[in-house]
Amino acid sequence: MKRNVVATAVRTALVTAGLAGFGATAALADEPAKTAPTPVPAPVEVETMQEQAIEPVTAAPPAQVEMESRTLAAGLGLRWGQGVLNFEGRNHGFEVRGLSLLDVGAAASDGIGSVTGLERLEDFEGRYVAVEAAAVAVRGAGVVTMRNEHGVVITLRSSQRGARLALGTQALSLSLQ
């Protein structure tokens, strides 16, 4: 009998609790909501790899020079002229002044060449030295490689007119205008 009393008491408690819970829920449903609305977070923009603006990497064209000069020599040669450096897509004028040893004759030369080792425009200026023997009679063509104190190297292909024999060191001073 004790079991029935306990079971009945438990059933009564459950039903009462169930009814009490139902009544509380029904009472709350009849009242207006008093809770603050839940804030909605702002949308987050997510950029995918396809949506990102990808800029193409473009390398600057290599620097180039065009130069024309005149030489007059009788043991010691004097050279003067002008040129244009194309660096990072812009043209920069420059003056050519030079000396040569063991040089005889007179010649005019025009040349075009590549410039390497040039990272800053101001490094172009300087004294270029080339140690090569060059002989030109009437018309000739040659290639000379020169380097300055900043590590800039010019490889110049030139054509010359006139008669000149240069056996010693040649030095050019290039200065931007």
Image: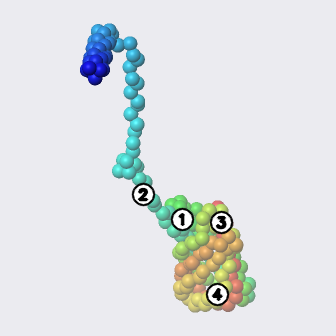
Q: Which residue is mark 1?
A: 86
Q: Nearer the viewer, mark 1 or mark 3?
A: 3
Q: Please say whether residue 78 is visible from this viewpoint.
A: no
Q: Nearer the viewer, mark 3 or mark 2?
A: 2
The earlier-in-sequence mark between 2 and 1 is 2
Could you tell me if the residues under marks 3 and 2 are in contact, i.e. CB atoms within 8 Å?
Answer: no
What's the CA distance linking mark 2 and mark 1?
Answer: 23 Å
Quadrant of image for the N terminus: top left
What's the CA distance linking mark 4 and mark 3?
Answer: 23 Å
**Residue 66 to residue 23: above or below:** below
The earlier-in-sequence mark between 4 and 3 is 3
In-front residue for pair 59/44: 44
What's the CA distance linking mark 4 and mark 1?
Answer: 26 Å
Q: Which residue is mark 4?
A: 132
Q: Which residue is mark 2?
A: 56
Q: Residue at x 43, y 54 (%)?
A: 55
**Residue 171 to residue 5: above or below:** below
**Residue 14 to residue 153: above or below:** above
Q: Which residue is mark 3?
A: 123
Q: Nearer the viewer, mark 4 or mark 2?
A: 2
Q: Amino acid at mark 3?
A: Asp
Q: Amino acid at mark 4?
A: Glu
- Residue projecting furthest to the front: 1
